Amino acid sequence: MLNWSEKTLAPVLSILLVGTATTLAAVLVSLKESTVESAFASSVVFDTVDGAPAWVNFDPSSPKITSRLSESFGLGRPKTNRDGKWVSTIEKPTNAGDRFAFCGELLQYQLLRTVEELQRGGWWVHWVSGAQITTVSKPMRLSRLQDYPGKTFLGIVAVNRFSDSDLERFKWEHGHLPLPKGTRVTLIHVASSPASGPEKFILRLKKPLFFEMDFVVEPIVTTGTGEPPIGWLPPGVRLAPELAARCETYEFQITMRATFERVTAGNSEAQEYKDWADWLFSRVRDELSD
């Protein structure tokens, strides 16, 4: 019979602890942080007289881009009812730099709205210029999903000027957004600087210990002065000559980047989130690319 005295037990425990630590270290070394990344171009057609996105008539030959730009028209003109009158809640941008910021922030908000619609799923019927567009969306199934009430995001979206609208507040108060359980949503603005480069508007989805997913909106400067040419429109978009003559097209690159933590790389959830990131990136690109 063994005699488990303190003198005997101490070295045994030491050996076991060292062995466990060594095994854990070997497992951690074998796990690697991974990144999924892609990018696409998107644009906003801006009416320089109205100081807001231009109204783009629906074109059956280019349904995707004309439908998206029609949505930009509504989101880019936030209003509130004051004493029975609808008034704008934002100021008109007056120069190219302000317009780039206006359009970049608008795309940031449109990104969040797109993610919300994709995650919620369902069907929608839109009427654009007398044409009916029916959309059906089926979200990807996740094993650990939490359906967050829309009112949870009122404080989060408040940093974006385009959320300051009676209609948008109503949608958030009565809507919902399903996300992986524990996911945090943040809207970030990074001012231009020599260190950070061009001005950026970022939508971030983060689940601690698992992933950080960024959708980064930054301008594509098309001329030497940074002033977009008047009258140039994205392919597939047609405007009346008098309207086109006062419109500018502001182009942006949207980079989608998801980083997955090394510490949970071997977890079954991690692979599920990678598949979800691929699905979400692909669907967002389909909805918002030119």
Image (tube, grey):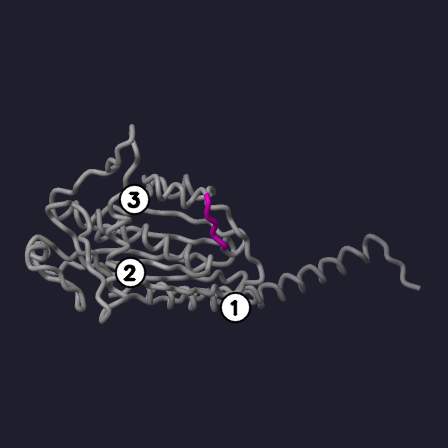
Residue 271 marker:
1
Between the residue at mark 3 and the residue at mark 1, the CA separation in whole angstroms equals 35 Å
> The residue tagged with tag 3: helix, strand or loop?
helix
x and y, in percent, of residue 184 in the image: 46, 49
- Find residue 37 and report its image quarter: bottom left
For disc 3, the neighbor class at 10 Å (few under 14, some 14 to 19, many from 20) is: many
Between the residue at mark 3 and the residue at mark 2, the CA separation in whole angstroms equals 19 Å
Q: Which residue is mark 3?
A: 162
The earlier-in-sequence mark between 3 and 1 is: 3
Identity of the residue drawn at 37% across and 64% down: 134
> The residue tagged with tag 1: helix, strand or loop?
helix
Residue 142 marker:
none
The earlier-in-sequence mark between 3 and 2 is: 3
Mark nearest the camera among 1 and 2 is 2
Q: Which residue is mark 2?
A: 254
Nearer to the camera, 284 or 81: 81
x and y, in percent, of residue 55 in the image: 19, 54
**Span highlighted in magenta in the image:** 174-178
